[in-house]
Image (cartoon, rainbow, N blue to C red):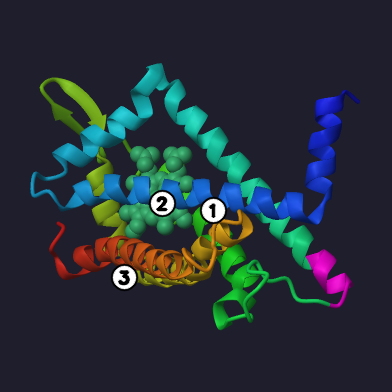
Amino acid sequence: MNTSLKSLTNFWGSSIGKKIVVAVTGAFLVLFLAGHLSGNMLLFIPDHGHAFNEYAYFLHHMLHGAGIWFARIGLLVCFTLHIVGTVQLTRANRAAGQTYEVDGTQRSSGSSKIMIWSGLTILAFVIYHLLHFTIRSGPASDFADPNLYTVTYDGKELHNAYKMVVDGFKVWYVSIFYLIAVTLLCSHLSHGVASIFQTLGLRTSKTESLINIGSKVYTLIIWIGFISIPLSVMVGIIK
Ligand code: HEM
C-alpha cells in the first residue's frame, strides 16, 4: 500500500478522522440543498414553467451532459461517506457504552438523539425522490412519457419538468410525504449545521452564538423554501 493511501486509511480508521469526514461531507450536502432550493424557486415565476424548464435543461446539458454526472458522483460519494461514517461512529460509541453525539461538548438535545433516525429517513426520502423525479418510475406516474412531458420553446424540445413537479404534488399523499420528509430533514439540519462548525473547531466562545443563530436561520429558510413548493401546488398558487 503506498504512503498516501495508508494515511487516508489511517485517517478514516480514527474516530476524529471519521468525524471530520462526516462534517465535511455534511457541509457539501448542506450547500447542495441551498443550490437545489434556489433552482426550485424558479417554479414560482408565473411563466408556465419556462425558466424552470430551461434551468433543468441547462443542468442536464452543461459540459455536454458530463456536468450533471460529475455532480451526481460527488453527491453519491458525500452521501455514502456521511452515512457510513455516522453509522460506524454510532456503533463504536454504543460498543464503548456511550451515545454518539455529533456535538461533543454540549448536552445531547432531542434532535441530536434522533440524528441517526432522521438521517436514515432522509436516505429513504432521497431514494423515493430519485425514483419520482429523476428516474421517473414512481407508481401512478407517467413522467417518462414524452408525449405528455415535452415542451417546445423556439423549436427546441425540452422535458417539461415544471408540469412533472406540479402533477407530482397534485397527488395529496405525495405532498404530505414530502412535507413530513422535509420537516425531518430540517430537524436533522437544526442540529447538524452547527455540529459541522463544532467538529471543525470553528465554534469557539466568540463565534458560538453567531453559529447557533446562523444555523437556525439557515434551517428555517431551507424548511420554508422546500415546503412552500408542495403547499403552493396544493392551494393552486403554482399550477
Ligand atoms: C419540494 C421540494 C423539492 C422539489 C420540488 C424537488 C425537485 C426536484 C426535481 C424536479 C429534480 C429532478 C431534476 C431533473 O432531473 O430535471 C430533483 C432532483 C434531485 N433532488 Fe430534489 N426537490 C425537492 C427537494 C429535495 C430535497 C429536500 C433533497 C435532499 C434531501 C433533494 C435532492 C435531490 C437530488 C439528490 C436530486 C437528483 C439530482 C440528479 O441526479 O438528477 N430534493 N429534485
- Callout in the foreground (1, 3): 1
- Residue at left offset 47%, top offset 65%: 206
> Would the CB of label 2 be found within 8 Å of ligand 1?
yes
Residue farthest along the front direction in this orientation: 206
Residue 136 location (% of width, % of height): 42, 45
**Label 1, label 2: how far apart the Cα atoms are:** 16 Å
Front one among 86 and 73: 86
Q: Which residue is label 1 attached to?
A: 127
| Secondary element type, mark 3 | helix
Residue farthest along the right direction in this orientation: 1
Q: Which residue is label 3 attached to?
A: 172
Q: Residues within 10 Å of mark 3 (few under 14, many from 20)?
A: some
Front one among 172 and 70: 70
| Secondary element type, mark 2 | helix
**Dot 2 amino acid type:** Leu
Q: Which residue is label 2 attached to?
A: 33
- Closer to the chain start, of discs 2 and 3, is 2
